[in-house]
């Protein structure tokens, strides 16, 4: 007997109460929607192509304090910091008369500006769960809006107030998120239940243009419709209608509500073509020839999320503790986004259509951020996706000509600096995600590490390589011509540190692949951080000597117009200062400690950087002692928990033989993550900050890229389980752990064997088993992890 397993799955999840699906592992999608966390509260599937969420005044789409909703858009990134992103096709339910002189005056194009017709709403009764969002609009008589989403299709349901006979949906093609410019759009009415179109935007901090095709079908016929543009509204117009140059454009649909007060829309998008949107809708949004019911899609969406979230299980802590943990996991599993349609087609970086057969193509790669924590988390939790992600990045090189830096849709934005793709891909190689493609991956990485893209190519690659390969540093040159918003010579000192880190990672890969000469050259280049270390620099307020410093093309040290150099200044460093970037040398911790005067002096510098005594006395001191503002990058000398360059700095204590201080700093940093809209530090950056929190809470953190090491520290929770491939489970036990309290590592066991060293290798984690921590209230300064033999590469001077 043949049967449809997808439909059977739908029936099975419908047998479960929706509240049971939602509450199994608590999620609060409002976490990060305030104070520039830049997350979105609406619905998305894990790694989904489509998201349906409210759009307000904020450039990233939504801010919890926004007072009006302009519409429910169909594309969002979680935590990105650039303007010109997302929010395409905002849909808003309204009431009132549409016509000349009406509430929506068809003689005036301004009537159809979403800033004019945006709806007020209330947070009372608002729901933000994994796969489901609900809000009450208080305008237009009161309308309840709900959204849910699968990977390639989504649903929205609008329930009008009782007694309302006629309702409208406004589909705005000419506007998206604030500062996201729609350069062209097209729409047509297909039939009395269906519309489709295309929206082209210029995206992401001055990036290139790309197109989104959409198709939307309704659970009932609309009784009237019309199209608006910059001349006003045209009742009855069916199109196709085109518009460009950010001019007004959209469609209104009118529904007879006398036989039911709600309207459900099922939508799908594609970055390939109109047929892709149709196929995606058919594959995930239809039940035969009818749109999938909203509650059926919601049940599927929330069941999918519970499967994803259930692969990591924790015990202990309050409801708030568990909500923060699982919401971090939710945010970390939102991206990269699925890029291939239901038939496997995707649009490559050559703007041609390609086929991903038996695998999924992914897009939207914030590599400068994600290479530090989120990439390693996905490799650990989702190895099959990690393989497809690695393959996607190699396809970008194959089709676009060069490896990406910040890949948005099907183009490289060239946003951010350094060489993030190298540590990103080398870690994936180290974790087995490039098995069978090692040679291809190495060739692409070597090309990037030893060359510069042609002038006519969009990608910038390592734009500072001309100087770096010749002199060992990227010159500081603010007049260097850029292909995008950022380029390495504009931030020469930090770019040098990033290049050297990348070279250290690639050296490990080269050695393992038998590329002996490359490995030797890259290992030497990994020490190029020393080329920008100026021992003569003095931080005047502290009297400390020695900091990284920008160098000019002729090799001289950069000096300000006064002739001096301030390591707290902004010159030569991208979104940070010399104080924050000085720790970006995980590939050479002994050398860094020596440059600072030895491990004792280096730890004292760390103490000053973290304001350790104040944080030890009161963990909440971090809200005053550390960098506070999400964009307060410069004129700073303390730890910045809101941005990526120093995310690894707490583990520098561990690598210098004082692991208990790592624990003190982590427990303090975790106070910045909370069950509230402001509960993320800085931009979440496509799950990076969330991944950092998860590693911190679990008791593991990835060491230098390419090393395969995960550094150990006291977990936040007493028990955690992580599902691994082939039914294996990694158990992390710390019976004395208490969320919100400091407990320090006295000893560690891996299985039945004592573990004195401060790390586990990737292969050990993959073998699964039990990692047992014994924690105590007070640290032992001569105990676990304090001797040279306990460390991966101990700085000289640490006790044997």
Image (spheres, rainbow, N blue to C red):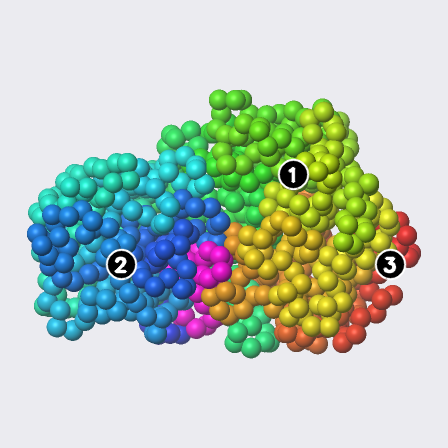
* Quadrant showing the C terminus: bottom right
- Horizontal side of residue 445 vs 141, given as left or right: right
> Mark 1 or mark 3, which is nearer to you?
1
Q: Quadrant of residue 154?
A: bottom left
Above or below, comparing residue 504 to residue 126 in the picture: above
Q: Quadrant of residue 441?
A: top right
- Horizontal side of residue 364 vs 654, given as left or right: left
Q: Residue at x 76, y 76 (%)?
A: 777
Label 3: state its secondary structure. Answer: loop
- Horizontal side of residue 754 vs 59, given as left or right: right
Q: Which range of residues does the magenta coloring cover?
A: 21-46
The residue beneath circle 1 is 572
Question: How packed is label 2: few (under 14 Cα within 10 Å), some, or many (20 or more)?
Answer: many
Along the line of sight, the residue nearer the viewer: 583 or 298: 583
Label at residue 553: none
How far apart in space, not on screen, are marks 1 and 3 (Cα)? Answer: 36 Å
* Quadrant showing the N terminus: bottom left
Question: How packed is label 3: few (under 14 Cα within 10 Å), some, or many (20 or more)?
Answer: some
Q: Position of residue 289 (x, y in %)?
A: 19, 53
The residue beneath circle 3 is 787
Q: Quadrant of residue 164?
A: bottom left
Above or below, comparing residue 72 to residue 202 in the picture: below
Q: Which residue extends farthest front?
A: 562
Along the line of sight, the residue nearer the viewer: 637 or 128: 637
> Mark 3 or mark 2, which is nearer to you?
2
Q: Position of residue 758 (x, y in %)?
A: 77, 58
Q: Residue at x 26, y 45 (%)?
A: 173
Label at residue 118: 2
Q: Residue at x 41, y 66 (%)?
A: 129
**Tags 1 and 2 touching, CB below 8 Å:** no
């Amino acid at each position: 007997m043949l049967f449809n397993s997808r439909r059977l799955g739908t029936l099975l999840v419908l047998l479960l109460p929706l509240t049971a699906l939602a509450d199994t592992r608590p999620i609060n999608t409002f976490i990060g929607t305030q104070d520039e966390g830049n997350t979105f509260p609406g619905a998305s599937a894990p790694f989904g192509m489509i998201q349906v969420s409210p759009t307000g005044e904020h450039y990233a789409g939504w801010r919890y304090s926004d007072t009006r909703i302009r519409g429910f858009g169909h594309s969002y990134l979680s935590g990105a910091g650039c303007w010109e992103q997302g929010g395409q096709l905002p849909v808003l339910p309204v009431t009132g008369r549409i016509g000349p002189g009406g509430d929506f005056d068809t003689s005036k194009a301004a009537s159809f500006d979403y800033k004019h017709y945006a709806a007020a709403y209330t947070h009372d009764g608002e729901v933000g769960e994994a796969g489901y969002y609900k809000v009450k609009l208080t305008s237009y008589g009161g309308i309840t809006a709900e959204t849910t989403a699968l990977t390639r299709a989504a649903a929205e349901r609008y329930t009008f107030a009782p007694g309302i006979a006629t309702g409208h949906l406004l589909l705005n093609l000419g506007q998206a998120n604030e500062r996201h410019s729609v350069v062209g759009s097209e729409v047509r009415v297909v039939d009395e239940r269906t519309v489709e179109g295309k929206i082209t935007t210029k995206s992401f901090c001055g990036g290139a243009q790309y197109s989104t095709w959409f198709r939307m079908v309704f659970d009932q016929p609309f009784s009237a419709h019309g199209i608006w543009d910059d001349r006003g509204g045209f009742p009855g117009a069916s199109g196709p209608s085109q518009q460009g140059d950010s001019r007004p454009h959209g469609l209104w649909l009118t529904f007879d509500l006398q036989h039911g007060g709600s309207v459900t829309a099922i939508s799908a998008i594609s970055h390939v073509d109109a047929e892709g949107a149709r196929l995606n809708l058919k594959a995930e949004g239809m039940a035969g020839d009818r749109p999938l019911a909203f509650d059926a899609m919601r049940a599927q969406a929330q069941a999918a999320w519970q499967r994803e979230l259930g692969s990591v299980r924790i015990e202990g802590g309050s409801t708030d503790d568990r909500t923060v943990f699982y919401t971090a996991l939710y945010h970390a599993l939102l991206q990269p986004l699925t890029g291939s349609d239901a038939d496997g087609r995707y649009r490559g970086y050559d703007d041609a259509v390609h086929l991903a057969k038996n695998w999924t193509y992914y897009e939207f790669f914030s590599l400068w951020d994600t290479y530090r924590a989120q990439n390693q988390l996905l490799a650990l939790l989702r190895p099959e996706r990690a393989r497809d992600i690695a393959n996607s990045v190699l396809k970008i090189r194959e089709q676009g000509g060069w490896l990406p830096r910040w890949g948005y849709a099907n183009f490289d934005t060239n946003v951010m600096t350094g060489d993030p793709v190298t540590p990103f891909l080398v870690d994936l190689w180290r974790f087995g995600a490039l098995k069978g493609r090692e040679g291809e991956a190495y060739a692409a990485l070597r090309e990037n590490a030893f060359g510069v893209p042609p002038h006519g190519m969009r990608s910038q690659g390592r734009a500072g390589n001309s100087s770096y390969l010749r002199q060992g540093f990227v010159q500081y040159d603010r007049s260097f011509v850029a292909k995008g918003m950022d380029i390495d010579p504009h931030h020469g000192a930090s770019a040098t540190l990033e290049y050297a880190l990348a070279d250290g990672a690639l050296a490990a890969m080269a050695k393992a692949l038998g590329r002996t000469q490359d490995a030797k050259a890259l290992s030497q280049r990994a020490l190029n951080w020393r080329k920008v270390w100026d021992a003569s620099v003095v931080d005047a307020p502290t009297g400390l000597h020695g900091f990284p410093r920008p160098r000019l093309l002729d090799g001289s040290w950069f000096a300000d117009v006064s002739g001096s150099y301030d390591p707290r200044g902004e010159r030569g460093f991208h979104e940070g200062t010399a104080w924050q970037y000085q720790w970006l040398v995980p590939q050479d911790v002994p050398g860094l400690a020596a440059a600072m005067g030895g491990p004792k002096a280096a730890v004292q510098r760390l103490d000053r950087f973290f304001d350790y005594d104040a944080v030890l006395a009161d963990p909440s001191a971090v809200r005053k002692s550390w960098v506070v503002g999400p964009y307060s990058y410069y004129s700073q000398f303390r730890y910045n928990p809101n941005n990526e360059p120093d995310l690894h700095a707490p583990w520098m204590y561990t690598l210098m033989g004082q692991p208990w201080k790592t624990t003190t700093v982590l427990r303090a940093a975790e106070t910045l993550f909370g069950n509230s809209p402001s509960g993320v530090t800085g931009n979440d950056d496509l799950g990076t900050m969330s991944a950092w929190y998860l590693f911190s809470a679990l008791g593991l953190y990835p060491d230098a890229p390419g090393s395969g090491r995960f550094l150990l520290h006291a977990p936040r929770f007493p028990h955690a389980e992580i599902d691994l491939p082939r039914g294996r489970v990694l158990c992390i036990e710390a019976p004395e752990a208490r969320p919100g309290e400091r407990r320090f590592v006295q000893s560690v066991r891996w299985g039945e064997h004592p573990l004195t060293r401060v790390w586990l290798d990737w292969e050990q984690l993959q073998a699964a088993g039990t990692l047992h921590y014994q924690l105590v209230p007070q640290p032992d300064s001569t105990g676990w992890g304090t001797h040279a033999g306990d460390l991966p590469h101990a700085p000289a001077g640490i006790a044997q």
